[in-house]
Image: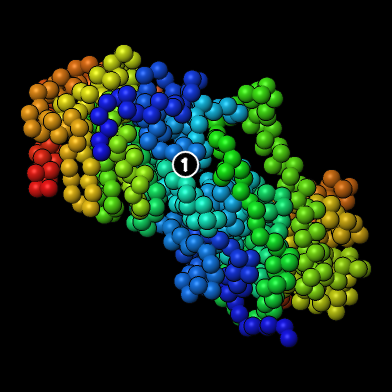
Amino acid sequence: MADVRIITANEAAALAAKLCKVQVVAAYPITPQTPVTEDLAAMIESGELKSEYLTVESEHSAMASVVAASQVGARVFTATSANGLLYMHEMLHWAAGSRVPVVTACVNRGVGAPWTILNDQQDSIAQRDTGWIQLYCRNSQEVLDTIIQAYRIAEQVLIPVMVCYDGFILSHTSYPVEVPPQDDVDRYLPPLDGNLGIIGGGYMNVNPLILSEPRLDPNSDLRPGYMDIRYRLHEDLRKALDAIGQADKEFEAIFGRGWGGLIWEYGMVDAEHVLVSMGSLASECTLAADELRSQGLRAGVIAVRAYRPFPDAALSRALRKAKTVTVFEKDVSYGYLGALATDLRSALFDAGLTPKVCSFVAGLGGRDVRPEQLTRTAADAILKQPALGWIDLKGIA
Amino acid sequence: MATRAARDLPTEEFILPGSRSCAACGLMLTYRHALKALDPGKTLVAVPASCMTVLHGVYPITPVKVTCINTPFAATAASASGLVAGLKAIKREDYTVVAFAGDGGTYDIGIQALSGALERGTNFMYVCYDNEGYMNTGTQRSSASPAAAVTSTTPILAKAQHKKDMIRIVEAHRIPYIATASPSFPLDLFDKVKTAKDIRGSRYLEVLAPCPPGWGFPNKDLIKMGKLTVECGIHVLYEIREGRLRLTSRSLVLAEKGRKKTIADYVKGQTRFKKISKDQIDALQQWTDQRWEEFLQRHNRG
Ligand SMILES: Cc1ncc(C[n+]2csc(CCOP(=O)(O)OP(=O)(O)O)c2C)c(N)n1
Ligand code: SF4
């Protein structure tokens, strides 16, 4: 009998960390991530999960301590949201540069000022260029499964992974979630032998000062300069596209569920008009696609699951027959378009594809996005002039 | 047992020729003696952005025989906490975790992470080498710089405020061991690091580390300058265990025999005090005397 529980995405995230047998947790509370830190504390205090728990005094310290714990070989976990994630920013770069397999949940929330505790994805999008893998989940089951996959990916490619899910919409909403048996998780995710050579080895200077040009080491071997090391991170991040797809395939083989790997597709077999989004908004887009189909427009949906590394080839392949691509996203690159729309246009341009691409910013700071709105906006984009803009603005005359 | 003579210090060196610190660097000398008191093969040192980063060498060469984990400037004590937790998780508690940070990385940007780590009772040693300024970035003021010092961010009027009383802040965390030291009193320094190594819980050491380019004195005077800091009483050597303060080494002798050197003697040989006025010397002397009295009283109270 499957173990199905009615739980929130936050509970699913904490359970996933437990199933992965994390050894060091460090976290600092922030709405809407807080229940994750509380659940893990209770699991660890009760002895249900054998792990160290660092009740640090800030998110900067949370990330600093899990990076260090990871460097000596422990499997680590932390979670945060919004201003907490921004407070980690320096350490996010440091984690990726350190090539440690840290896994972090980001419970997506809008960032101040003005204060909001409600959902959008500006927080994680603002961390796009830190060198992390970013995976976006559509529902609580995907959150649980993706955190398990995240360790598999991170420990294979030695790049940290951020698993993102929408605050309140997922974090505080209960849904049935199947909790996989521990044995299966152990089979999928063997214990970590992650010691980066710090323990039991010789003397090391980890993450030292580096020059721009290559230099000889004491054995007269040429070692790379800063730019070369950074290129390696970039190259490995690009290669992680395969690892992300593979991790999902192998997950499906054991657990009987997959999430599409890099992108998730809905009604795409014959779709001419495609709604593209990330996270729970992508699930909502399926309602709009159904409605558009009933109006005679062949619509489909793509959820971008892996945002970094960007799945340009997978997207171009899936969109090669598209006439209209309507991107709905809960973030904006201020002064230009939504971040996803920008990246997608660039990918399509490189692939020589020229569908009409429309960028819509929606649902910032928790503003409700209704399926009718998505339908209407997408229909306008399909049938009228290419539209760019923010949907459902109010009260600004 | 206190170490009595320099010849009793271990002869093995862990900082090899080729260190990138300046000549006559008080920090380098501090680190040299501290490593002798540790077991460098079983030690992880967490180091923030500072002169320590530079001392540890430029990739791919390090002149120091200890594993050093470089961390961002504010993160030293948090990184050390992570190392401690990670070692516990993988059952390698035979390693000692030591943080080694400057006064900027301790008094200023790193104070939050340090306070967090001390409050949690993290099992590690934190050494603040205090060279009284942001030396790595070119001698800017820190909250550890003394009053009346000219720094590159107090270039005309000199620093108006006295040095922050960091040890009182550290003491408020009620940790098992706190000590001060000086590279000019290596036996005392060595003994304190050794003592701290064997204590469980958070241990804090603060070493006043003279810096020739930052303070403005000739390289040849490094040891003399370190001695003068103690002789004049601006730096006091002591340890605090379970709340009890005990003067040590030269400061203990001065407590019995009285101090002969004054602040006027101390500031004379340093260009950072080139603008110091008579009133400022008096104020610094008064500040020093008052602290000295407090230490004496605590020492005598036992
Ligand atoms: C977040 C951050 N801000 C500023 C710096 C620049 N910075 C590097 S070292 C340093 C001064 C370090 O001063 P201190 O801790 O006293 O050590 P010292 O250089 O004197 O050894 C500064 C300001 C930095 N690396 N990171
Ligand atoms: S600036 Fe001062 S502390 Fe830094 S390396 Fe030089 S002498 Fe040492």
Question: Is residue A75 among what the camera can see?
Answer: yes
> Observer-nearest residue: B240 or B197?
B197
- Residue to which mark 1 is pinned: B43
In percent of width and height, residue B202 lies at: 35, 51
The quadrant of the picture occupied by the N terminus of chain A is bottom right
Residue drawn 69% across and 67% down?
A186
Residue drawn 68% across and 29% down?
A224
In percent of width and height, residue A117 lies at: 50, 67
Q: Please, is residue A335 above or below residue A170 in the view?
A: above
Chain for numbered disc 1: B
Q: Which amino acid type is shown beneath numbered disc 1?
A: Thr
Question: Is residue A394 among what the camera can see?
Answer: no
Residue drawn 89% across and 75% down?
A296
In percent of width and height, residue B68 lies at: 50, 37
> Observer-nearest residue: A227 or B43?
B43
Residue pushed farthest bottom? A1
Q: Please, is residue A188 above or below residue A345 in the view?
A: below
| Secondary element at image label 1 | strand
Residue drawn 14% across and 34% down?
B252
> Observer-nearest residue: B231 or A336?
B231
